[in-house]
Amino acid sequence: MTKKTILVIDGGGRGSTLVKKYLQSRSVKKVLAIPGNDLMLLDRSVEIFPETKTTDSKKILDLCKNYKVDLIDVAQDDAVAAGVADVLIKNRFKVFGPTKAAGQIEWDKSWSKNFMIKNGIPTAKYKTFKSEKDGISFINKQKDSKWYIKASGLAAGKGAIFAQNNKEAVGAIKEMKNFGSAGKTYIIEEFLDGEEFSSFAALNGKSFVLLGHAQDHKTVFDNNKGSNTGGMGCSSPPLVITGQIENQIKSIIQKTATGLLKLKRPYIGILYLGGIITKKNEVKVIEFNARWGDPEAQVVIPSIKNDYYDLVCKVLEDKTPKISKDNKYRIVVTAAAKGYPGDSSAQIGKEIKGFSKLLKNKNVRVHGTRITVKGNKYISGGSRLFYVEAAAKNVAQARKIAYNALSLVSIPGGNLHYRRDIGYRDLNR
């Protein structure tokens, strides 16, 4: 059997998780990553391309030709929005990831919400606006309420702002301009009271296979305080997902696949359903994403016992493989430079003490993102730095393992930040 070369288009913790999973396959010889990160190079079967942008279709195509790549996993949102999959498919490469048209379900929230309404997919009531003045005028006519104000375009997971009242909503509308082109069009959405979750499925255009569920912890501080981030940690499988809830999720995913197929936009790849379970035990969709979540990938992917390369190939062949899970509870904790999600530049260039000990800890897996390796030193690049994944029989044990491991690591001056309550919902249950 000729072993395969895989390209993963991503550089963060999600990409790190995918690289590790593909390398576990008996069919895979080498994994390339664009842009990748330094910690991926701890495995000699990995090659990274840090100078190549995830949106540079021409460079990516040339690289695929030069390395005779057998499969490309388009795992990053900007790459989907740039139509990287379209270019590679046109050049007859095997691609796992949606086309630009199918991926509009993520990169254009206004379009996505309209798609949901047309296809009978339950979601929050909303209105779309293209000017600051019109949005503020709308809010001023409403009774004082809680709202979500969301940039319609891609904003690195930070484009949704929760407002406790109309005054805060006006402030959030004014913040939309800070997201550049992503915030030129924005959504004002009713607040839904309930428990949030994320679900992931692999779609082959017509049908799908459900891969798992997780709960992200979005805000920067414990007890859901502070600004939204790209994700401060995750837990899986969330105990709130009962059989009845999962049936609703499956129905929504099937409606989504069918709706996109009717538009001649067959969806191939991972679909991320960000949902909420209301007080009436009804699932409503907050958003769709056109790829794995980060850090959700770090808890769901490792739980899949299937050979991941074989799984992806079967999906691409219009099959629906049976998924086998290891039934462990996982948490992943995000370790960030102090100041994130704001300015963490003061931590760039500082050594992360104890990191080599963390890497040697056999009780956890470490997924890197913004760490530079210089000799035997591990240097902070600011923002989210790395993720610590722990697996056990239950949430309490997994938390203990993860936080014991994190106690080994620091940036001098107390400049390493992480939440200490990841998995709190299931711990309370």
Image (cartoon, helix red, strand yellow):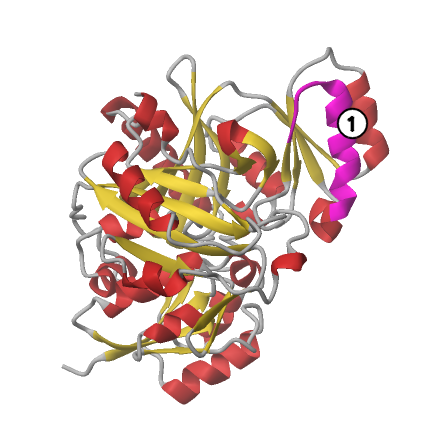
Viewer-proximal residue among 420 and 80: 420
Which residue has dot 1 on it?
170
The residue sitting at the front extreme is 413
Q: Residue at x 37, y 53 (%)?
A: 408
Q: Is residue 156 above or below residue 74?
A: above
122 relative to 204, above or below = above
Please identify the residue farthest to the bottom as the structure is shown.
Answer: 66
The quarter of the rendered structure image containing the N terminus is bottom left
Element assignment for label 1: helix
Q: Quadrant of residue 317?
A: bottom left
Query: Can I make out residue 178 in this image?
Result: yes
**Which residue: 47% across, 72% down?**
34
Q: Which residue lies at the image location 55% right of the left edge and 76% below the top edge?
A: 52
Give the main secondary structure, helix, strand or loop, of the magenta stretch: helix
Residue 169 among magenta residues: yes
Q: Is residue 407 left or right of residue 232?
A: left
Image position, residue 59 (x, y; %): 54, 80
Residue 358 percent across, percent down from the top left: 34, 58
Camera-nearest residue between 68 and 45 = 45
Write the residue at 54% across / 56% down. 412
| 138 sits to left or right of 266 | right
Query: Which x, y percent locates residue 266?
Result: 42, 53
Q: Is disc 1 surrounded by few (<14), some (14 to 19) or many (20+) residues within 10 Å? A: many
Residue 164 covered by magenta stretch: yes
The magenta stretch spans which residues? 162-178
Between 259 and 250, the residue placed more toward the observer is: 250
Residue type pointed to by label 1:
Val
Left or right: 395, with 37 as reference point: left
